[in-house]
């Protein structure tokens, strides 16, 4: 075995998905396959339970960093596609990503997506948002999930782009709004609902009408709904998109910009449109408190948002050290696995009255 010299870093991506980052030299390709084979072998070992035993299989997708312009999200998506290819072939094993998977996977998933709603494979999960200084639950973010009948849970990184490319995003977005507004109606008045909106949804001339209809049917007051818009030139430049956001704000709906700081349109959106909230992307949070540049960026973003009259939510908070650092910087709200994973609607009702305690000890 020669791959032991390779630097290996594992991470949980969500649910039962895990990622492994390998760093190495010319033999990295062989090392990646050896690591994948070792993972499959280790996981498939029999698990002894009382009066029985069982086995677990692993499906592994491999991709390689090819040039500096490749974004981490794209690498994960490519690995996902390779993994789903293994699942299509009967599960258990590994496959290396190749561009030919794109067309095959897109055709298969597009066909299945068309039937996902009628088959009731789509559902909404809710991840909590907290104000640690006060220990208060402030809201839940609605997250669309796809539990495929054959492949299991399909990552949003894979199916959301396909829904956008094929025009399915409008019907999916309407489904999430209706389901989430209905669920949020039973929450305490101080707990708001956050729903992600694709920039493509804003190009629909009836988008504002769809939002208001979901609110009216559920009985949820408009001020308890917050729409999270990913920064985009499309949202800024499309005629009527900003007009719809203004119309919804006049009705009392709140608007936030998601993944702030990851694109060129962030500051322009803040300048042209009075946003209620800025959500700082997890990539700026992950290195806190030791990352000096990340610390400076987060500090500046929080001050900027507050100067513009907006509140700040930090995404991807997973460690107490990060939470304490953000509290010192004056962050209004936090979200991440430290505070809770996405949950089903019924399970969150039992937890929403429980206070959160963040204690600093020295």
Image: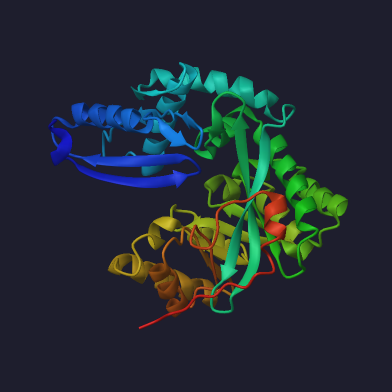
Quarter of the image that includes the N terminus: top left
Quarter of the image that includes the C terminus: bottom left
Q: Nearer the viewer, residue 134 or 160?
A: 134
**Residue 331: horizontal and vertical position, in percent?**
50, 73
Task: State which quadrant residue 25 falls in.
Answer: top left
Q: How many marks?
A: 0
Q: Is residue 324 toward the left or the right of residue 34 in the image?
A: right
**Residue 210: horizontal and vertical position, in percent?**
79, 45
Give the farthest residue toward the bottom. 362
Compared to 257, does 79 lie above or below?
Answer: above
Is residue 71 visible in the rendered structure shown here? no
Q: Please give the name of the residue rendered at 42% of the width and 69% of the height, measured from the top-left corner.
A: 320
Q: Nearer the viewer, residue 195 or 147?
A: 147
Q: How is the image coloured?
A: rainbow
**Residue 131: horizontal and vertical position, in percent?**
57, 72
Q: Please give the name of the residue rendered at 38% of the width and 59% of the height, measured from the top-left corner.
A: 286
Compared to 139, does 110 lie above or below?
Answer: above
Is residue 117 visible in the rendered structure shown here? yes
**Residue 302: horizontal and vertical position, in percent?**
47, 72
Q: Is residue 54 toward the left or the right of residue 348 in the image?
A: left
Compared to 220, does 112 lie above or below?
Answer: above
């Amino acid at each position: 075995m020669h791959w032991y010299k390779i630097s290996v870093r594992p991470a949980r991506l969500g649910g039962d998905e895990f990622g492994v980052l390998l760093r190495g030299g010319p033999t990295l390709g062989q090392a990646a396959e050896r690591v994948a084979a070792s993972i499959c072998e280790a996981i498939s070992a029999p698990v002894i339970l009382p009066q029985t035993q069982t086995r677990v299989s692993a499906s592994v997708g491999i991709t390689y960093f090819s040039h500096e312009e490749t974004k981490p999200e794209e690498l994960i998506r490519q690995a996902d596609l390779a993994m789903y290819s293994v699942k299509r072939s009967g599960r258990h094993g590994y496959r290396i990503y190749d561009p030919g998977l794109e067309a095959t996977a897109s055709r298969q998933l597009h066909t299945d997506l068309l039937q996902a709603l009628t088959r009731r494979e789509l559902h909404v999960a809710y991840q909590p948002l907290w104000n640690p200084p006060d220990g208060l639950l402030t809201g839940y973010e609605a997250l669309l999930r796809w539990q495929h009948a054959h492949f299991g849970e399909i990552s949003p990184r894979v199916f959301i782009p396909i829904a956008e490319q094929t025009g399915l995003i409008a019907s999916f977005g309407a489904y999430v709004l209706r389901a989430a507004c209905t669920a949020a109606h039973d929450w305490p008045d101080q707990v708001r609902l956050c729903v992600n909106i694709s920039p493509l949804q804003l190009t629909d001339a009836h988008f504002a009408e769809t939002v208001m209809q979901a609110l009216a049917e559920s009985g949820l007051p408009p001020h308890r709904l917050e729409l999270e818009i990913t920064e985009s030139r499309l949202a800024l430049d499309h005629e009527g998109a900003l007009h719809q956001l203004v119309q919804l704000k006049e009705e009392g709906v709140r608007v936030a910009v998601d993944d702030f700081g990851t694109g060129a349109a962030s500051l322009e959106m803040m300048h042209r449109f009075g946003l209620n909230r800025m959500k700082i992307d997890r990539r700026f949070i992950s290195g806190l408190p030791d990352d000096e540049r990340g610390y400076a960026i987060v500090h500046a973003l929080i001050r900027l948002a507050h100067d513009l009259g907006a509140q700040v939510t930090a995404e991807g908070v997973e460690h107490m050290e990060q939470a304490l650092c953000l509290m010192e910087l004056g962050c209004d709200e936090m979200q991440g696995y430290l505070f809770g994973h996405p949950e089903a609607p019924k399970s969150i009702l039992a937890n929403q009255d429980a206070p959160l305690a963040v204690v600093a000890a020295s």
